Amino acid sequence: MERVPQYPPNLRPPKMQKRLKFMRGPEVVHKNFIHKQYGIVAESGGRLRWGHFEMLRLTIGRKMDINRMFAIWRVPPPWQPVTKKGQGQRMGGGKGAIDYYVTPIKKGRVILEIAGNCEFSEVKSFLDIVAQQLPFKARVISHNLLIDSEHTPIE
């Protein structure tokens, strides 16, 4: 995953408003597993920074047995700019410079999917560690649990 999106050389990177609609409400598209096995699902909205992607990549790459299983990203790389004014600046003077980029996540979005020749008990141990370190509530879930939770309301 790239830290900063690549723009053509003649295009200035656009600044953007917060657009909280990208984080609010339930996910309508990416809420089911492709390979129907295991993954991490967001339980609330939030933003993923590049450091969170690196933490996911390094932890799962270390703990996962690559001969029997594989992981798939289900979220795009950071694309939404977040601006910040320099410390000590007075009010006014226009919008600040782009500080970093984020990926907004809605409730119910599948963040990562793990599949292959593996059991839920062996995958759950290292995915729990990763899910707790995300900047929003997330849980490790299997396809069967995901289907059951769609039919019963989660509080």
Image (cartoon, rainbow, N blue to C red):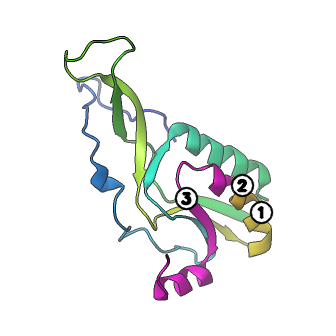
The x and y percentages for residue 11 are 23, 27
Which residue is depicted at the point 77% across and 48% down?
62
Mark number, residue 129: 2
Q: Which residue is mark 3?
A: 137
10 Å neighbourhood of mark 2: few (<14), some, or many (≥20)?
some
Is residue 95 found left or right of 37 in the rendered image? left
Circles 2 and 1: CB atoms closer than 8 Å: yes
Relative height, residue 73 to residue 79 (above, below): below
Relative height, residue 143 to residue 66 (above, below): below
SS at mark 3?
Answer: loop
The answer to whether residue 113 of the structure is visible from this angle is no
Mark number, residue 125: 1
Relative height, residue 78 to residue 74 (above, below): above
Q: CA distance from mark 1 to mark 3?
A: 17 Å
Which residue is depicted at the point 42% across and 41% down?
102
Three-letter code, disc 2: Ile
Which residue is depicted at the point 48% across and 34% down?
3
10 Å neighbourhood of mark 3: few (<14), some, or many (≥20)?
some
Q: Nearer the viewer, residue 32 or 22?
A: 22
Relative height, residue 11 to residue 56 (above, below): above
Q: How many marks?
A: 3
SS at mark 1?
Answer: helix
Q: Nearer the viewer, residue 44 or 142?
A: 44
